[in-house]
Amino acid sequence: MAHQCGNCGCDKDFGTPEKFSDTLIELEIDRIKVTVPQGTSVMRAAAMAGIEIPKLCAMESLEPFGSCRLCLVEIDGRRGHPASCTTPAEAGMKVHTETSQLAKIRRGVMELYISDHPLDCLICPANGNCELQTMAGRVGLREVRYGYEGHNHLSLQKDESNPYFTYDPSKCIVCNRCVRACEQVQGTFALTIDGRGFESRVSAGQNEAFLDSDCVSCGACVLSCPTATLMEKTLIERGQSDDHIVTTCAYCGVGCSLVAEVKGTQVVNMFPNKNGDANHGHACVKGRFAWGYATHPDRLTKPMIREKITDPWQEATWEQAIEFAATKFKAIQAKYGQNSIGGLVSSRCTNEEDYLVQKLVRAAFGNNNVDTCARVCHSPTGYGLSATFGTSAGTQTFDSVQDADVIMLIGVNPTDGHPVVGSQIKRRLREGAGLIVVDPREINMVNSAHIHADYHLKLRPGTNVAMANALAHVIVSEGLYDENFINERCDPKEFQTWKNFILEPRNSPEEMQEITGVPADQVRGAARLFAAAPNGTIYYGLGVTEHSQGSTMVIAIANLAMATGNIGRTGVGVNPLRGQNNVQGSCDLGAFPHELPGYRHVSNADARAVFDAAWGVTLQNEPGLRIPNMFEAAFEGTFKGLYCQGEDIAQSDPNTQHVEAALRQVECIVVQDLFLNETAKFAHVLLPGASFLEKDGTFTNAERRISRVRKVAPPLGGYGDWEATMMLANAMGYPMHYDHPSQIMDEIAELTPTFKGVSYAKLDEMGSIQWPCNDDAPEGTPTMHIDGFVRGKGHFMNTEYVATDEKVTRRFPLILTTGRILSQYNVGAQTRRTKNSIWHPEDILELHPHDAEERGIVDGDWVGIQSRAGETVLHAKVSTRMQPGVVYTTFHHPFSGANVITTDNSDWATNCPEYKVTAVQVVKVAQPSEWQQRFQQFRGDQETFLKKPKKATVDS
């Protein structure tokens, strides 16, 4: 069901897209003069003048179609009654929108619609929010002369196959809005109009059920539907809302703005905010529909404590649990030293919560033992972009891609991992931009509806740097680099050093072909295409960073962008697509052991002095422990306490058995989360976490955009995450007091130069802000490095290819690489507790038909995947998306044990794990692995402990 704009504070719908032109024209509509840009439709011009022309098929987010015939107008000097949505405004036009003849035509058209439409308005879930109903009243329809005796569509059956929405063809008016939304907004082309004339109806695929079609359940079709034909099931079940709250999605790093429709504190619907700066009224299946986890029965709602992980849980009050944790931590520090405890910051929590956790560690614990899951995903981005550009973040807005002439995707799968950005990219590709995909797997962007990559460089996993050097070699050796940009913006001596290195014959595509497996002519063609483009942009993801040379590859990407002059304007840039909703924010605000908020090193005395004065402590001047160092220190007996807010290292970190063994060595683990996740099963204190619907704060997305998160309902556990951190700090003896997260942001702004101009008041006024936001950029910075790099001159750096230690052998002849899938998110704790699991109920192993045939494997077989670290068992899927010798899986289900087989290999600069390269063997098996069997037993025990807790005594 379409959201009727204006009801939630967003702008009204002007019927057709906005046009931009330096030429303005004046026309007259109903005797009102209006000036509009050339190319504007008559319908939009009328709306700009405050005149609403009736419409059913028109929508501002879609190109005009002209099928409903309600928007007809009269124009002086022109015959007939043209559709205002498809008629461009012209200078001097005199338009009439309300005449007796128009009224008669419109009533006649509406009468035909109603004659084949169920008249069940009072019990229809769209009652009161139905555009057909509204337009019937608008045109003055008072009777329908045609009965239902003739042929009609009222008996057509509903399609209930999709878990989130229904399709009722009996209510379809064939306005085509859903079909156009699928094409123009989402870019999937899953819907069509089947049949002709009176028999026309919307069809998913070739008369398939929605669930069986190519539909990705983004909800764009539902949002565009003017009737109850496509309808959210939650609205059918719970009724329409009585209020709305604008917030920000808590899934990937796109940071979509969403509108929660509520009844009291119950969410009845969620739809994308038309005014969202990151998403412009679009969303994916997760943000649009998969929010039911927030009220799932598995939610932790009471604090729990216990002495040992083999003990049953004891239900405690918040005061008891906090005191229990603080007492344990203080005792550990008294016995093992100040550096024996630490904390983990969550990339799923808000900026304010992340800031408080690192402040807790540094000020209350008295050390720098703080880390975050950004360590295991995008820490190489921070290192590489800081070294070359001076800032550790993306350079552009998402909208910038609309000005790109060539788009290069390296190790990123936008349609699955960042679907809304994926749709934006696809839109630009349909408009004619070129596409280069660098990925060992054939992702959807390589070949899908109306999209085909110009080049798919299907390299071997682990050879990214070799590929980047080969591309650069072509650009430099053929004189395709931007000499003016380099001379003006980059250090000339460093460029010359890099140029000499990259021109060495060993970096040529012909030499690198043996390493990457990609034919030299393809590499040369891709390099020429990118370098020749007026605007070339690079998007990359975990397929770049999660390698032993992750940081080197980020530097290599920056070198490519600088060499071709693709920095500092729209349509270009280096764009890391962050995997979680606040990876960027957690990095910005001091979640690493070596950096204070604002990326200031802990060894910087001036930076420490700022925080010493503000926090009333003396900070340590040496970096603390990273997550892998915490594990090693746990084995050594020197790290004994951990506060873990919103992270699940037992599932997400590599070499699971090593992680589990380390966690068993820790004497007190405090986990604050929504559910009993895998790490929580090793915990001694459980604190209920708050979902994004239960908190106020901000997230920072992959384009540095800070957006508000607004509370829809009170926390199920009684306290917000920031309040729990504050309580623990106070119990540890460090005074910490805030009345609202806005005060935390005020402190962040006071102490962090890039956030200096950020406040909740400004965010409410502007909608969102991209940092840096300070005196020099009071409204934020959409595009970085316009006049110069933050570090001064751009820094070219040599990027020597060094092969990973993880090599194939006769025992382990295949390479495993990992990734994500559209319907699931990260470790799956949220999405597995929604109906998204209908699409991905388990992780599977994809392998090429050649590798499958050699091993006698067919679709659906149980296969064991063995590596140097361990073994797990998954079902097999034979797929030509893989190249021979490479297998692929996801990591969304804990039982899958994907990280049981990944190793401790990591990036040389940041310790980011090398998830993307693991040497394995795959064999046909008949039962789960030994680890999986142990996992099932341990999980069963821990869930039993949680289901039957005892009451904690006061002494506990």
Image: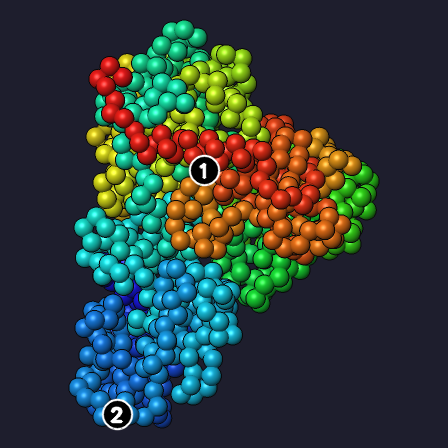
Q: Nearer the viewer, residue 470 or 176?
A: 176
The residue lying at 26 percent from left, 52 percent from top is 267
Q: Nearer the viewer, residue 352 or 764?
A: 352
User: Is residue 534 visible from the viewing direction of this image?
Assistant: no
Query: Eyeballing the image, is 140 above or below 252?
Result: below
Q: Of marks 1 and 2, which one's residue comes earlier in the chain?
A: 2
Q: Position of residue 751 (x, y in %)?
A: 35, 26
Query: Eyeballing the image, is 601 above or below 106?
Result: above
Which color mode does the image show?
A: rainbow
Q: Nearer the viewer, residue 567 or 416?
A: 416
Label 2: how many residues lie within 10 Å, few (<14), some (14-19) or many (20+)? few
The residue lying at 29 percent from left, 75 percent from top is 46
* Left or right of residue 376, residue 466 in this image: right
Query: Eyeballing the image, is 700 above or below 602?
Result: below
Query: Eyeballing the image, is 693 above or below 181?
Result: above
Please name the residue that numbered disc 1 is placed on.
583
Q: Nearer the viewer, mark 1 or mark 2?
A: 2
* Quarter of the figure with the C terminus: top left
Q: Nearer the viewer, residue 313 or 4?
A: 313
* Left or right of residue 948, residue 782 in this image: right
Q: Secondary structure at mark 1?
A: helix
* Left or right of residue 44, residue 866 in this image: right
Q: Position of residue 255 (x, y in %)?
A: 40, 47
* Residue type for callout 2: Tyr
Please name the residue that numbered disc 2 is placed on.
146
Q: Position of residue 919 (x, y in %)?
A: 69, 37
Label 1: how many residues lie within 10 Å, few (<14), some (14-19) or many (20+)? many
Q: Secondary structure at mark 2?
A: loop
* Residue type for callout 1: Val
Q: Position of residue 408 (x, y in %)?
A: 61, 51
